[in-house]
Amino acid sequence: LISRKNQAADTVVQVGNLKIGGGNAPAIIGGPCSVETVDQMNAVASHLSQEGVLLLRGGAYKPRTSPYDFQGLGVEGLKILSETAKKYGMTCVSEIVRPEDVEMSCEYLDVIQIGARNMQNFELLKEAGSVKKPILLKRGLSATIEELLYAAEYIASRGNSQIILCERGIRTYEKATRNTLDISAVPILKQESHLPVVVDISHSTGRKDIMFPIAKAALAVGADGLIIETHNEPAVALSDAKQQLDLNQFSTLLNQLRESGYLK
Ligand code: PEP
Ligand code: MN
């Protein structure tokens, strides 16, 4: 179903007024790693909405490596995210980790994210296929391009073809970046499938000093959008403090992309 052979035309996933894919302007998905407080979300959303960002992110169920790290606010986080997005005329996306939470999350979310660690949680994929919300499907930490496409096919096979694929870096021996951004995955995914493809420049690199060249590279190879983790006070963020841009850095990055013609 998701193959180019089955459908030649690009799928455009519409989220509110934002159109993702099909040659539309690159979609910028911004917001913190985790929803922490109402004040934090207001600070981030007011800034991002002024920059023209339409889709706000923020994790409420965090798949953390250590059980002792901040696990997210759960449904309270979904509520804060959703209310903040509405307040600033934005839509929102957040990760859901349990199949039984998918239906409940539809009340709060405009896009449901399936994270890298759950790309092959097949019951979650099937559940995501049974709702009428766009799904942001991230590539697994060690998943091949083919496995990502089959994961998307699971969702589509249950009746939901509003899927956005996300390249977020893969595990390699390289330590200079958190993951290795597989830039060639973007044109390959777009060749193999009609679904839109976005690049997460934060989780793929894990560092903020190379955001501009990486963002340019992603857009140059045809990405339909970028995910950029952004926090009002990254230094004290409860997760991914090292990689989140502060609000000024976010604006600087967008300005650099506009000045170099990658963004309008
Ligand atoms: C995230 O986007 O919040 C996240 C945890 O990313 P990933 O699943 O790609 O690691
Ligand atoms: Mn994160």
Image (spheres, rainbow, N blue to C red):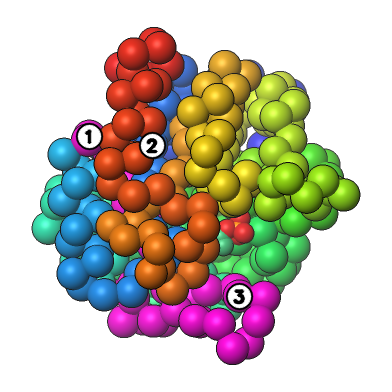
**In the image, residue 179 lies at what x, y percent?**
71, 49
Tell me: is circle 1 under 8 Å from ligand 1: no
How dense is the environment of label 1, judged by Cα within 10 Å: few (below 14), some, or many (20 and up)?
few
Q: CA distance from mark 2 to mark 3?
A: 25 Å
Please tell me which of labels 1 and 3 falls first in the chain. Answer: 1
Please tell me which of labels 1 and 2 falls first in the chain. Answer: 2
Q: Identify the residue at image location x=87%, y=49%.
A: 173
How dense is the environment of label 3, judged by Cα within 10 Å: few (below 14), some, or many (20 and up)?
few
Checking the image for residue 85, the label placed there is none
Q: Are marks 1 and 2 in contact (CB under 8 Å)?
A: yes
Checking the image for residue 28, the label placed there is 2
- Residue corresponding to mark 1: 52
Q: Are marks 2 and 3 in contact (CB under 8 Å)?
A: no
Amino acid type indicated by mark 3: Arg
- Residue corresponding to mark 3: 64
Amino acid type indicated by mark 1: Gly
Can you see residue 214? yes
Q: Range of the magenta residues?
A: 51-79
**In the image, residue 167 lies at what x, y percent?**
64, 41
| Image-quadrant location for residue 60 | bottom left
